[in-house]
Amino acid sequence: MPTAADAVAVAGTLQAPRAGVASLDNATGHKNMQQLIQLRWFAVVGQVVTILVVHYGYRIHLPLNQMLQALTCLALFNLASLLRWRTHRRVTNGELMLALLVDVAILTSLLYLSGGASNPFVFLYLLQVILGAVLLKPWSTWTVVGVTTLCFAGLALFSRPLSLPPDHDRGLWSPYIQGTLVCFALNAALLVVFITRISGNLRERDAKLAGLRQRAAEEEHIVRMGLLASGAAHELGTPLATLAVILGDWRRLPHFSSDPELLQEVSEMEIQIQRCKSIVSGILLSAGEARGESSEETTVSTFLDDLVEEWRTTRPVGTFVYDNRFGRDLPMVSDSALKQMICNVLDNALEASPHWVRLEVAHEGDDLQLVVTDAGPGFAPAMLAQFGKPYQSSKGRPGGGLGLFLVVNVARTVGGRVAARNRPEGGAAVTLALPLAAIVLEEEDDEEENIGMHGHDGIPH
C-alpha cells in the first residue's frame, strides 16, 4: 500500500509549482522595474530639453536653478535604483508604488515652479496613473490616483504663476496649445513604448506560467501513477510467492518429473514467475522502498553494459548494436529509475523495429548522451509535435503513450533532456542527454573517504 513517504512526494509535487510561480512573478517585477528606470531617464532628458526650450526659445522666465535641482534629485534617485536592482532581483508591489510616487513628487515640484494647474504639462499625471494601473495591485493604483488628484488640486491653489498669454484662439501658434500638443505626443509615445514592453513581459510570464502548470499536472499524474503501481506491487507480491511455491511442489511430483515436456513447461513458468517478481521489485525500488538494500556503487560503463546485457537476453531482438564511446569511466550509484527509462526507450525502438536496434553512448561536454536508433517507420508529425505528452501513441491501444511520457519526466527530474527525430534514411532516433553532475559520484569525496578509513599512512583505522 502507499506509504507516508508517497504522500510527502505528492505534497512536494503540489508545492513545486508555487515556488515556480513566485520566481516568475519576481522576474517579471524586476523586468518591469528596469523598464520604469529606462522610462525615467527619457523623462529626465525630455524635461531638461523642454525647460531650456521654454526658457530660452519662448523667452518665458522659469526658475532654472530650482527646476534643474529637482531633476538632479530625480536623476540621482534613478541612478540609485539602477544600482540597487542590479543586485536585488525581487521587486515588491510596494517598491514599484514608491518609485511611481517619487516620479509624482518630482513632477509636482516642477509644475509648482512653472504655473501649477495652468501648465499644459500637468496632464503628465495621467502617465503615472496609467503606469500604476498596469504595474500595481488595485489598492496601490487607487493610492496613486488619490495622490495625483490631491497634487493637481494643490497646484490649483498653491503655485508660482507662469506668464503664458491667454491666446488660445491662435491655434497651433499659441504657446499653451503647443505645450499641450507636446505633452500629448510625449504621453502617447511613452505609453506605446512602455506598455508594449510591459505587455511583452506579461505575455512571457504567462507563457512560462502555463508551462509550469502543465509540468505540475504531469508530475502529479506521475506521482499518482507511482502510488497506484506501488500499491499494486505490494498486492501482487503474495500471489506471486504462492505461485512460486506451488510450482516448486509440482516439480517434485512424480507425474511432472517423469514427463520431460511438462517439466520443461513448469521450468518456463518458474522463469516467468521470477521475472514477474523482478518487475514488482523494480516497481517498489522506483517508489523508494528497499533502495538502501538494492543500490550499489558501480560505474557508468558497467551500469550501461549490465543494462544492455540484461535487455539483450530478455528481448527477442534480431540485431542489436551497442556502441559505447563514453571514454574515461566515472563512478555512480545504480539507479532503477534510470535503468527503466533507458529500457523503455529501447523497448519502444524494438516494437517499431524488431529486426534492428542500436544504442550509442557518448560523453558530450558535461552530459551522458545516449542515442537509441531504429529502422522502423519513424514518428508521425503529430507524435513529434506532442512528444513526451501522456497518451500520445501510434499503437492504438487504450492507455498507450505513457512510456515516452515517463521517460521525459524521469530525465527532467535529473535536469536532462529528451529529443526525438526521424532519420532521413528511415527510422527514428531518440536522444537522451543526462547531466553527469546529477548521476555520478564525486571522486574527491571518495578519495577523502578512503583517506579517512585508512589514514594518511595507508593503515586501516
Image: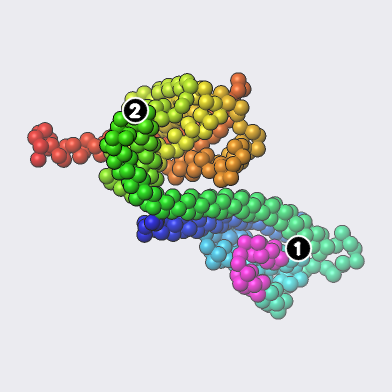
Instruction: State which quadrant residue 337 falls in.
Output: top left
Please say if 451 is above or below 54: above
| Left/right of residue 432 with respect to residue 398 in the rendered view | left
User: In whole angstroms, how far apart are the C-alphas of marks 2 and 1?
Assistant: 117 Å
Q: Residue at x 53, y 43 (%)?
A: 402
Q: Is residue 335 visible?
A: no
Please say if 323 is above or below 133: above
Q: Nearer the viewer, mark 2 or mark 1?
A: 2
Residue 443, image x, y percentages: 28, 35
The residue singled out by tag 2 in the image is: 260
Residue 290, image x, y percentages: 30, 48
Q: Earlier in the sequence, mark 2 or mark 1?
A: 1
Please say if 390 is above or below 41: above
Asked whether residue 130 is drawn in magenta, I would say yes
Q: Mark 2 Cα within 10 Å, few/some/many (few <14, many 20+)?
A: few
Give the label on residue 218, or none. Answer: none
The residue singled out by tag 1 in the image is: 60
Q: Foreground: 192 or 455?
A: 455
Q: Residue at x 44, y 34 (%)?
A: 343
Type of residue at label 1?
Ile
SS at badge 2: helix
Instruction: State which quadrant residue 281 falls in.
Output: top left
| Left/right of residue 71 with respect to residue 124 in the rendered view | left
- The boundaries of the magenta stretch are 125-148
Residue 436, image x, y percentages: 39, 35
- Assign the magenta stretch its main secondary structure: helix
Asked whether residue 132 is drawn in magenta, I would say yes
Q: Given the current orientation, which residue lies at the most extreme right position?
A: 169
Residue 185, image x, y percentages: 77, 56
Q: Foreground: 385 or 4?
A: 4
